[in-house]
Image (cartoon, rainbow, N blue to C red):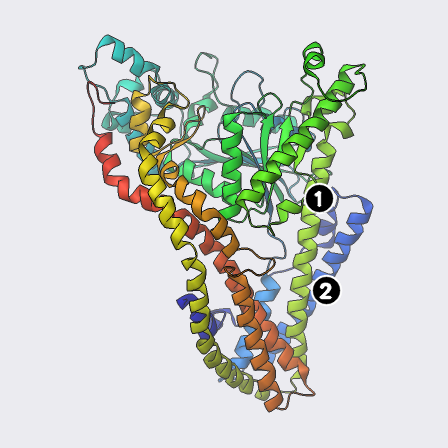
Amino acid sequence: MAETKDVFGQEPHPVEDDLYKEPTRKRRKSDRDQRFRAFPSMEQSALKEYEKLESRTRRVLSNTYQKLIQSVFLDDSIPNGVKYLINRLLALIEKPTVDPIYIGLFGSTGAGKSSLINAIIQQAMFLPVSGESICTSCIVQVSSGCCVQYEAKIHLLSDQEWREELKNLTKLLHRTEELGREEADAWNRDEAVEEATWKLQMIYGNGAESKNYEELLRAKPKRKIPTSRVITLKAEEAEELSIKLDPYIRTQRRDWDGEAAEMHIWPLIKHVEVTLPKSDLIPEGVVLVDIPGTGDFNSKRDEMWKKTIDKCSVIWVISDIERVSGGRAYEDLLNESIKACQRGFCREVALVVTKTDKLHLPEYLRERKAGNQAIQSQREAVLERNEMIKLQRTRILKEKLKRKLPADFKVLEASDLVYTVSAQEYWQQALLTEEETEIPKLREYIRKRLLDKKRRTVTKYVTEAFGLLLLTDSFNSTQNLPNEHLHMSVLRRFAEEKVELLEKAIAQCFACMEQPLQEGVRTARTSYCCILRSCLVRSKGNQGFHQTLKAVCLKNGIYASRTLARIDLNEALTQPIYDQIDPVFGSIFRTGKPTGSALMPHIDAFKHSLQEKMTEIGIRSGWKYDSCKKNFLIQEISAILGGLEDHILRRKRRIYESLTASVQSDLKLCYEEAAQITGKKAC
């Protein structure tokens, strides 16, 4: 709880550095209005009111800031209370009202993520799509902005990051002459070996796979790599940018000889940011993220894969209609999404079933069991099946979410947890209308999330600014302010006394995890051999994973292939522990009705005790007829503790991930030793 004490013992901003800083200028009215193009008229009116209220508030804050600065400019000894006010004003003036909403499209190979994004942004072939193979080779972020052109930034691995991967790739490909013919053939068929070979060939040409690390460091890449490690593409039209962008983000086929020069740097690409001009469909402030299903063998790309998932406040699990029932990949992705809710900032999860126009009518009619009404057409069959899929998957998904998440979690109250979409029918409309493809429904979902977030954020911002302005206006001279600092000192002493009680309450919260934690550890210890075996063979059968096992060891227990299921031994070993502690962990961090083990009610009780103390100080100090001072300081308590809540949310993720990190740390030396083993029967 040292962090809590710091909150009450320090000024919220470094005064000397910020005191005479010029506040940023506001956005021009015409630019603000352009942001509303994606909204219908009623929502536009609401957004304009929010923008107007925010703009007026910032203007008043800026004027107050300038007057306050002018009044103290020549004063050698500025009272601490005045410094506090100046810095709070500046912080509010420059505070962004709405952070971007990241919506992650999380799906396995061929699920239709890129096709779905193309339909949502109304650009049929903007991101590469294919019905036969993997297309998107990296994380791609798509958003609209205030630019006039279509723009893409391709971010590459740094030189150090590529050297790290190069070292691991060459280790992975190392082989000895001790292998027999049968073992060598199995080795070469290994998916990890194929992937490593292909990456090296793309960068350095044929034969690169037989060279060692030092030789490849001296080798010249097939294409010049920009020193900035960022490639920027611009175009007037979407199609033009799409053509330029395609070779960078499309996974290249090994048997394709007509490759462009840009394709040679595919293994170096970290992620891609695409910005559209002002859009009539996607509002500014929303980022659609195409997230590959498994991460990447490169440590930095895999780390970014995890961070991107945790950055998303909304995750759509994408699964095509043929794999949504009983597919292992779908279950793994759904579990990963729920974990994002448990550990991070994600608040909503939905299942988006794609390619729902695909239906073999005779087969469907033969297997159809529900409904008395006769099916007359393919269209009726598609609509009926879509409705059945929604009902079934909503029930299953809600049950799964209830088992894993706290009872007050917002997603459990959602009316729509499952969407059945067809990007192909959105363009053709041979069977379904535009509304029936549910693409417009997803756009509405996006707009409502942004509108709701804007409303809540602006309301909070204006309330905070109003309290600060009332206090500033109530002072006839700056001489009144030092007394307020004295009152804050009283509050700090009071807070320090209460912190001890809060620490005990928090300790009790986490003590609730002790028993399930021990039970989970016992379960993990007895089942780790089975876990190890199942992780290694679940995608490869019982043979042919010679180098996959080595790849797992090289990456400290994790192998993230772009084509196979993700292998994470550390996570698998800790899963029995998580199964035991998840319900308790969720109840500790729940935000709704208080429970015995919930943390936030203790924080709220702490806040109320401080506010009561403030009222008591106000009465003693004669604030009966000057409520501005009292209201401001009470509001400051809420603001400070609001910051504490954000801090708790960030630490929550670190706590949740600590089990897996601990296992990985304990096994690190074992992984390193195992990775060095080569030769016959190394597996």
Q: Which residue is mark 1?
A: 447
**Residue displayed at 43% across by 23% down:** 264
Taking depth in this image into account, of 592 and 118 the one nearest to the observer is 592
The crowding category of the residue bearing disc 1, from other C-alpha atoms within 10 Å (few below 14, some 14 to 19, many at least 20), is many
Q: Which residue is mark 2?
A: 56
Which residue, as the protein is rendered here, is positioned at the far left?
Answer: 178
Q: Is residue 492 above or below residue 585?
A: below
Taking depth in this image into account, of 557 and 135 the one nearest to the observer is 557
Taking depth in this image into account, of 229 and 612 the one nearest to the observer is 612
Q: In the rendered structure, which disc, 2 or 1, sits on the residue that comes first in sequence?
A: 2
Instruction: Look at the numbered disc 1 and give the secondary structure of its residue.
Output: helix
Left or right of residue 135, residue 514 in this image: left
Residue 621: x, y in percent? Answer: 60, 90
The crowding category of the residue bearing disc 2, from other C-alpha atoms within 10 Å (few below 14, some 14 to 19, many at least 20), is few
Is label 2 or label 1 in front?
1
Q: Is residue 277 above or below residue 215?
A: below
**Residue displayed at 53% across by 77% down:** 83
**Residue displayed at 38% across by 54% down:** 514
Screen quadrant of the N terminus: bottom left
Q: Amino acid at mark 1?
A: Arg
Instruction: Look at the numbered disc 2 and give the secondary structure of its residue.
Output: helix
